[in-house]
Amino acid sequence: MSEDVFREIDRPWRLWASAIVVGVLAFGCLSGFVILPVIQGYQAGIDPYTAICRSLGILPGSPAARQPVSTAPAAPVSQVSWGPSLIARLNKPDAARGQEIAASVCAACHGEKGLTADPAQFPNMAGQSAFAIYKQLHDYKSGARANEIMQPVVADLTDEQMADVAAHFAALQQARWEQTWVRAASPQVETIVRTGDSARGLPACESCHNPRSGGPIETPVLFAQTKEYLALQMQAFKSGSRKNDLYRRMRSISEKLTDSEIDQLAQYYFEQR
Amino acid sequence: MKSLERLTLAHLWTAFIAFAVACVFGLWQMLARSPIPTPGFTPSNYFISVTAHGAAMAYVLTTFFIMGFGYFTAETALQRPLPGKRIAWAAFGVGLLGVVMAVVPVLLGRASVLYTFYPPLTGSAWFYIGLVLVVASSWVWCAIMIVAMRQWKRANPGRPVPLAMYATVANAILWLWTTVGVTVELVFQVIPAALGLVDTVDVGLSRTLFSWTLHAIVYFWLFPAYIAFYTMAPEAAGGRLYSDTMGRLSFILFVLYSLPVGMHHLFMDPEHSTGFKFVQMTLTVLVTVPTLLTIFTISASMEFAGRLRGGKGLFGWIGALPWERPMVLATGLAFFMLWFGGGGGLINMSYGMNAMVHNTSWVTAHFHLIFGGTVVIMYFAIAYAIWPQLTGREAPSLRAQRIQLWLWAIGMMVMTLPWHYLGLQGQWRRVAQFDYANPIIAAWGSWVVVSVAGGAMLLASALLFIWNLAAFHRARTPVQAPFRFALAIHPPERVPASLNGFGLWNALVAVLMLVAYGYPIAQFFIHDRPVAVVHRVDGAQP
Ligand code: HEM
Ligand SMILES: [Cu+2]
């Protein structure tokens, strides 16, 4: 059989296949970009041009609905905004400056090496996540977290300085991230940490407070902390005196914990070092 | 054992071992989600398990099965030695290495990111690099399939490529197109993020690139099932394929319309406009055409076989079919599940109705039914059909094979029907535990337990399947007839070049992709785009 014969029987296939594909595509485009948006836009009081541009994604918004205007004032619990430049700064800080601020300002209370001399009063800093430290410093400065001692301390620090000192403390004793699991004294606490208690709407602590979890970036490391401070913070969340946690994450959790559970959890995390 | 047989067996055993292990994980997940107390349950274990189960089923079982079956088909259907066997073995090694690289971090809890690549959540870079190696090894397979067909065509000018091989190459071409999206996403976005080279990632772009792959990949998985429908089932039923051209057309339509449609996975996403979603929905509707063509053609072929065997009347031919043969039984069961799965799929792809089922258990139930059901039961049937050739022995017991297939189909229905219902009730997917103390959720409990029972049947069936395959290797009866693919009632003498190659179709896919994905991807580079902070869950960095 010659080449020509093949070309002959192939031609209608090529033509029809192309025509059908282009036809279907044209139908889809006409309906999706013109007919539907114009009709829907008409019903929503949107002019055809805007409706078409919206359906193409050139203008924002839906072609079928007016853009709702919200008049509710924003009331964020924290002013921290995790952007690329901030993250970059936390990852590549000015180490010398962080060291200097830590030594001159913070060491008096949080210790030379980030380990507090007075666990009843001051939290540890060493091995804490840089993101968590930064978030708290920023919150003290913006007033999102109120504390008579810390607020004046950070009042004059710039964002960069806060990032530098946060990264400095985080870099101390990184090894703490490698957990050595100690079993909790009571199985009930173990359950709250590992699996949560779904009947009380309590998620597992570990689903956020674990470097391998999907918890928010500002989640603090609990292993490095003193037990007095951990209990104090959970009580503060519970009473609502601390309210800088986004989406009330920790407030809604702490409210469901009994005082004894709070103490046991603090003890449990304190022991994981 | 001959070299082709060894190559095929290496691939298929890898696939099926991953499958069986993943089924154990599956049942454990089912238990975890139920009100029944589950040993070893923690939320983090749950996500380790779902990641391992999903990746093993979606990437390991499928890719290795398709490669092994493709090598087998190339040599058997073309009746020429497979070119590049050594390269194929090397690719197998790379793929296996990739699997190990991916599995280890998952089991260590350093890549609990599920099988979909949706940043900003990123796991260990080893996980992604391992999966890229699996994809790379499958590209070698694609090249070998294309070369094999080319060589055959050169040696047989003007003759139509045997349907089984034509379909296999269609799948190879589809796969090359498919993997572009996910590979670009992994190499340029996810792996740099996982390695800590970048701190932010454009999730709109990565979701779009993943959607490029996400629909077409399911057709890649589906192809072997359709190859079996067209080229194995009619012969097994004692008949002939009703139409060879219908087969070619269906495979071509799959290549055309499974790619420019992936955005139907993003209906509820904000980064794309309604117009493009609508266009891709329109194209999605066309995927039903090859499916309907297939149902028609295969039913006609079966009717032909049934009547040859003396079946009379409107439905008499159905009873006359040799249901005792595993391939025929599996085809029947696969079609049965296809009705339900296909119906569910039509709901998923409808822009409006998608809002109702999005991210609910309905979706997981749907793909277990169509993929775990229709597709995987045909993988079983193919394995049973070619294992005699691979091992040189006959099956010791067809009965055990039939029991296994029935158990799989019934288990799948028992597991997925309540699962669909729960999705409609609002049960979330990808959630580790439910608060059964809540009265609304408590009402779901009994249905979840029914699903668990279905899952247990599936695990039993999976283990029986492995047992059945192993039985071949221990069997004594030598194989009686060599394996061959079914012919059409009127085998084609000549076919138009378009139905014997892929040039035209590649060009049309390019046009469709340009229209469907051109601006939606370009917009990320035209406009200022918000980026998300990378969230690493491998513990390398807080
Ligand atoms: C013993 C049989 C099986 C059982 C009991 C089972 C059960 C499950 C369960 C409970 C989930 C988690 C769903 C969620 O968290 O929302 C899941 C996920 C998954 N299953 Fe299966 N499954 C089985 C077989 C299969 C098969 C045969 C396939 C495909 C070949 C498959 C593919 C998948 C995939 C890809 C996922 C990941 C879904 C996601 O990440 O959302 N499964 N399976
Ligand atoms: Cu899809």
Image: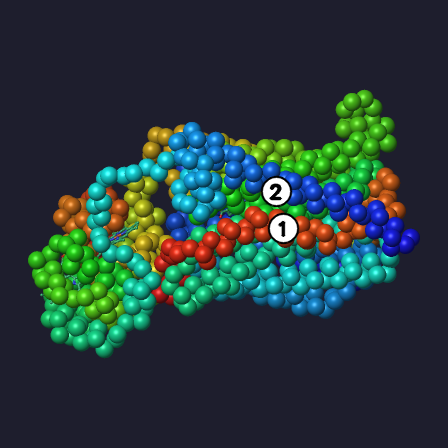
Residue A68: where, in percent of width, then height? 32, 37
Name the kind of residue labelled 2 in the image. Leu
Question: Outermost residue, bottom direction?
Answer: A96
Residue at which label 1 appears:
B511
Residue A40: where, in percent of width, then height? 45, 32
- Quadrant of the rendering where the C terminus of chain A is positioned: bottom left
Residue A67: where, in percent of width, then height? 35, 38
Q: What residue do we see at 25% from left, 75% from top?
A: A95
- Image position of B525 (left or right of A25): left
Labelled disc at residue A25: 2
Q: Eyeballing the image, is B5 above or below B370?
A: below
- Local secondary structure at mark 2: helix
**Spatial distance from mark 1 to mark 2, Cα to Cα?**
10 Å
Q: Eyeballing the image, is A7 above or below B123?
A: above
| Chain assignment, label 1 | B
Name the kind of residue labelled 1 in the image. Val
- Local secondary structure at mark 1: helix
Q: Residues within 10 Å of mark 1 (few under 14, many from 20)?
A: some
Q: What residue do we see at 42% from left, 29% from top?
A: A43
